Amino acid sequence: MSYGCFNIRGGKRIMKYVIVGASASGINAARTLRQFNKECEIVLISKDTYVYSRCILHHFLDGRREI
């Protein structure tokens, strides 16, 4: 889920986005937003301590990959 609003910084309107969830979709959303707008503010909210991809979680669990 993402939500956008405007923020005023130095007299300039800056778009601010809030992304809920740091899974693969949340990280991709942040990456895509940054590609389209280099000056926007992005806030990523997650209950997780680390950012990770659930798509490769099984690689971590069986020892093929480390954090």
Image (cartoon, rainbow, N blue to C red):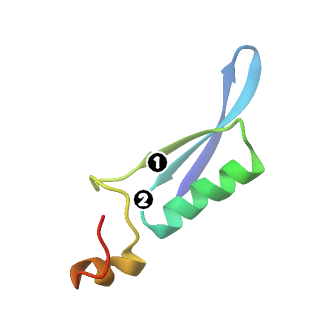
Q: In this figure, which residue is indicated by the disc labeled 2?
A: 22
Instruction: Please name the residue shown 73% across and 52% down the image.
Output: 35
Where disc 2 sits, the SS reads loop
Where disc 1 sits, the SS reads strand
Kind of residue at disc 2: Ala
> Marks 1 and 2: in contact by CB < 8 Å?
yes
Q: In this figure, which residue is indicated by the disc labeled 1?
A: 44
Kind of residue at disc 1: Leu
Q: Is residue 13 above or below residue 17?
A: above
Quadrant position of residue 5: top right
| Closest to the observer, 8 or 64 | 64
Q: What crowding class fits label 1: few (fewer than 14 Cα within 10 Å), some (14-19), or many (20 or more)?
A: some
Q: Is residue 19 above or below residue 15?
A: below
Instruction: Please name the residue shown 67% across and 49% down the image.
Output: 34
12 with respect to 28 (left or right): right
Q: Quadrant of the C terminus?
A: bottom left
Instruction: Please name the residue shown 27% across and 52% down the image.
Output: 49
| Closest to the observer, 53 or 14 | 53
Q: Position of residue 59 (x, y in %)?
A: 32, 82
Q: Alpha-carbon distance for marks 2 and 1?
A: 7 Å
Q: Position of residue 48 (x, y in %)?
A: 29, 56
Quadrant position of residue 53: bottom left
